[in-house]
């Protein structure tokens, strides 16, 4: 906000589109100036910006390596503007942008030159949302996504991402805005890295439990062998001939605890058992991807599953 601004700020909700040029700080000064010029051209091509400027419903705030557009009408305005900009940059191959959208409180003032100026939490949060993304991403705060979901045309573009940790340890719930040929459909690296670290910490913290679980898994392996030995001996001889005796599948372990984080641990147990079984010569082991269809809370019919997978033996278990 300008130091010469009037001392009676006006409070309202601003709908903010924060845009950043990816890799800006690593460029030479001449390259930076060229990309900023291209960004201004792209923003100027937006019909949403043009109409809002004519109506005095948008305030552009240059940020050095990008721009924040504060719309003063609806949450649809920054989202529509982001789509228009994402389409327009196809003509500018060197211009790599990431965008963040949030609606929040802003202070609107008029400086001594009678120009609108704004600041406030709405702008700061929009920047935090943008910071979670990579090149091509249009990230939206969950708050804004819930507003957009009321309009059928936006629903195909909205894809849940979960939470992202931002400055000062705060966490923001995010939604990825993209379509078939617009935006970035990949999960942002910052979120993927957080999930990897979370899964690693979950496994490391449960190593004593893992040992006990392997003992249970070994027992289940023996039980599974006996059960299917009995079941398949009851089948017709021609059916037995089609299923290798040395064949096994490890069903997804069920998470029976109230902690959803244990799902990572359950998957880890299944992977470890599969890895050990795969080392046994002449043993046919069904891949993990082939058994994931049985990762449900519904009762399992082991006979039918064995027939569907074409195996003589099954292993199943749970974590709690």
Image (cartoon, rainbow, N blue to C red):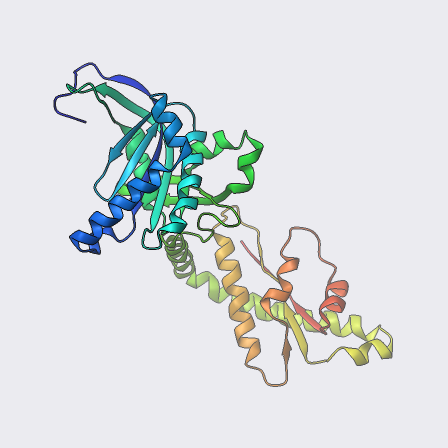
Q: Quadrant of residue 150?
A: top right
In this view, the residue farthest toward the bottom is: 281
Name above or below for residue 93 compared with residue 248: above
> Residue 271 placed where, x, y %?
52, 67
Name above or below for residue 97 compared with residue 285: above
> Residue 47 placed where, x, y %?
41, 33
In this view, the residue farthest toward the top is: 8
Asked whether residue 44 appears in the rendered view, the answer is yes
> Residue 192 placed where, x, y %?
40, 55
Asked whether residue 170 appears in the rendered view, the answer is no
In this view, the residue farthest toward the left is: 4
Q: Quadrant of residue 117?
A: top left
In this view of the protein, which residue sits in the foreground, 21 or 310? 21
Residue at position x 50%, y 50% in the image: 181
In this view of the protein, which residue sits in the foreground, 5 or 113? 113
Count the labels in the image.
Answer: 0
Residue at position x 63%, y 81% in the image: 283
> Residue 71 placed where, x, y %?
36, 27
In this view of the protein, which residue sits in the foreground, 19 or 102? 19
Name above or below for residue 83 compared with residue 280: above
Name above or below for residue 64 compared with residue 293: above
Residue at position x 72%, y 80% in the image: 245
Q: Is residue 239 left or right of residue 199?
A: right
**Which image quadrant: the N terminus?**
top left
Q: Quadrant of residue 205?
A: bottom left
């Amino acid at each position: 906000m300008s130091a010469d601004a009037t001392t009676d700020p006006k409070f309202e909700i601003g709908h903010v589109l924060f845009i950043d040029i990816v890799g800006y700080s690593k460029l030479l000064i001449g390259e930076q100036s060229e990309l900023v010029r291209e960004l201004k051209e792209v923003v100027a091509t937006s019909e949403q910006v043009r109409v809002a400027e004519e109506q005095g419903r948008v305030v552009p705030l240059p940020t050095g390596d990008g721009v924040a557009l504060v719309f003063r009408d609806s949450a649809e305005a920054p989202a529509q503007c982001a789509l228009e900009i994402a389409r327009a940059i196809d003509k500018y191959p060197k211009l790599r942008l990431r965008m963040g959208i949030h609606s929040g409180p802003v202070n609107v003032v008029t400086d001594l030159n009678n120009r609108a100026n704004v600041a406030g939490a709405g702008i700061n949060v929009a920047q935090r949302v943008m910071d979670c993304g990579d090149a091509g991403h249009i990230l939206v705060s969950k708050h804004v996504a819930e507003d957009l979901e009321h309009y059928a045309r936006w629903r195909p573009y909205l894809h849940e991402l979960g939470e992202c940790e931002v400055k000062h340890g705060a966490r923001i719930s995010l939604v990825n805005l993209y379509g078939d040929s617009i935006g970035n459909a990949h999960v942002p690296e910052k979120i993927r890295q957080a999930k990897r670290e979370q899964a690693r910490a979950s496994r490391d913290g449960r190593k004593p439990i893992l040992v006990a679980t392997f003992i249970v898994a070994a027992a289940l392996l023996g039980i599974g062998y006996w059960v299917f030995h009995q079941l398949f001996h009851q089948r017709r001889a021609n059916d037995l001939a089609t299923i290798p005796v040395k064949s096994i599948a490890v069903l997804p372990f069920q998470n029976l605890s109230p902690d959803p984080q244990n799902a990572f641990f359950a998957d880890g147990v299944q992977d470890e058992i599969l890895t050990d079984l795969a080392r046994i010569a002449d043993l046919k082991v069904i891949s993990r991807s082939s058994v994931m269809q049985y990762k449900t809370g519904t009762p399992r019919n082991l006979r039918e599953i064995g027939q569907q997978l074409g195996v003589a033996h099954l292993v199943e278990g749970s974590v709690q």
